[in-house]
Amino acid sequence: MNVAPVIPLIAFSVFITAIHAFQPCYQNQQLSSWGLRPKPPRMQLSMNMVISLDRNAQRQIDQFQGWAADCGVQADNGFCLVGDMVDGNEDYRAVTSTGTSEGSRVLTVPSEMILSASLIAQEYRGSVESALQRLEEKGFLRLQPHFHLFLKILMEYEQGESSAYYPWLDSLPRRWNTAASFDYFCMSTLPPYIKKICQAKRDELSAFQESLKAFDYILPETKADDELVKFAYNVVMTRVLPSQEDYKIVPAADYFNHGNEANVAICYNEQTADCEVYASRDIAAGEALTLTYDMPTNPSHLLATYGFLNEAPATYCKLLFTNPSEKLKQIGYDPSQLLFSTQDGSISSPVWDVILYSKLERTPGMAEAKNAFYEAHMNGDEETKFAIHSQFQEATCSVLLEHVETILKEVSQLTSMMEKFRNEDRHPRLPLLMKHHAMVTLTFSKVRDNLLSMY
């Protein structure tokens, strides 16, 4: 195993350039068999120390790496953790200090360490049904796997140092920039599209907290601790990895940050169920090891869910239709395809298709053109599509220009409000939201310039 040297930490108040590799230090630590208690007794919080949730609590990365090594984590080809300050928060990411070639293994995590939603569900069968019923009543049963992981995090937290996962929990962030952590002022500074996404995430948290009340095996003081509940929710939502028919949190593998183009791939060994991570291309020394999180061209979604601003080469154009028709969806109404280039403001073809078809749908007397365009699209007849686009170019440009200018006006007004009431001590997430608004303004201004040149 290639192990990078451990460089001493520089104070986080300045900046972080520490590199951590997995090295044994917990010689007697044993990872227990899940540590789940199907019917745990009511008790007061463990007299053992629980992790501090204070925003300024230092993340214990050294202890985590030692624990991980003792539990059997194998770090290969220079896998290590590098620390930085990102948007005012302490952040760690996986890198390769030596570089590696395509197909090489960079990390192996034993199956015993993995938190599996399906296994937790089996352990809790007969104890969690009332909570799941409440989750269903709130309309969030689709998040049942995440809720099981959420319960697991809380139960391990209650065990304090007695938890086999204590070193991992103590390495996790205490500061979050996710929508669940926004205050009401931050929510008031968001334009409609991202505000809708952020409110949906806050509704998830609220449903989890309400459903938790029906689970008898979490202590009342835990249920009443809003910051702890928020911590557990954020841990699950930012670190869960979907796999076939399951959702998992994999300590150590949860340190792969997002990249617009992933350079590693995760798989699970069919014989051992261990998590194995391989390079999907050649990777240079010092390069970050990355996965691609869902919806990479939607920075609003990534900010709301994971708490970072993704600077992708293209971004969602923020077109919203209430109850879009099935045919409009077939034409291309899909946020992952309705894109503006962040580099030059160019407009993707599906944007033009959706705007034209939606206009034809809503305009009396356009049934013939609407049907012709739909048939041409479904049959791949680009010549006919081009002819219809040309016929209505001025009208579609006008609709899109109005949309772009509306977004720019909204974002400008909200940015002015942020500047007027800016107080980073009270609202520490404002700088990140202002960066988001600045990115939207820059991109949409380029689009506006392109549209004006078409007249």
Image: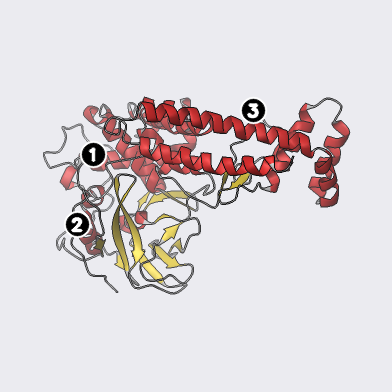
Q: Please, what is the three-letter code of the amino acid marked with disc 1? A: Arg
Q: Secondary structure at mark 3?
A: loop
User: In the displayed structure, would residue 339 be above or below residue 213?
Assistant: below
Residue closest to the far left: 47
Per the image, the residue denoted by label 2 is 10
Left or right of residue 411, residue 43 in this image? left
The answer to whether the residue labelled 3 contacts the one labelled 2, judged by CB atoms less than 8 Å apart, is no
Q: Is residue 166 visible to the viewer in this orientation of the structure?
A: yes
User: In the displayed structure, would residue 437 be above or below residue 134?
Assistant: below
Q: Earlier in the sequence, mark 3 or mark 1?
A: 1
Q: Earlier in the sequence, mark 3 or mark 2?
A: 2
Q: Please, what is the three-letter code of the amino acid marked with disc 2? A: Ile
Q: Please, what is the three-letter code of the amino acid marked with disc 3? A: Thr
Left or right of residue 28, residue 197 in this image? right
Per the image, the residue denoted by label 3 is 322
Per the image, the residue denoted by label 1 is 55
Residue at left offset 43%, top offset 59%:
290
Residue 57 found in image quarter: top left
Q: Position of residue 18 (x, y in %)?
A: 24, 60
Q: Is residue 38 visible to the viewer in this orientation of the structure?
A: no
Q: Position of residue 293 (x, y in %)?
A: 47, 51
Q: Secondary structure at mark 2?
A: loop
Q: Secondary structure at mark 1?
A: loop
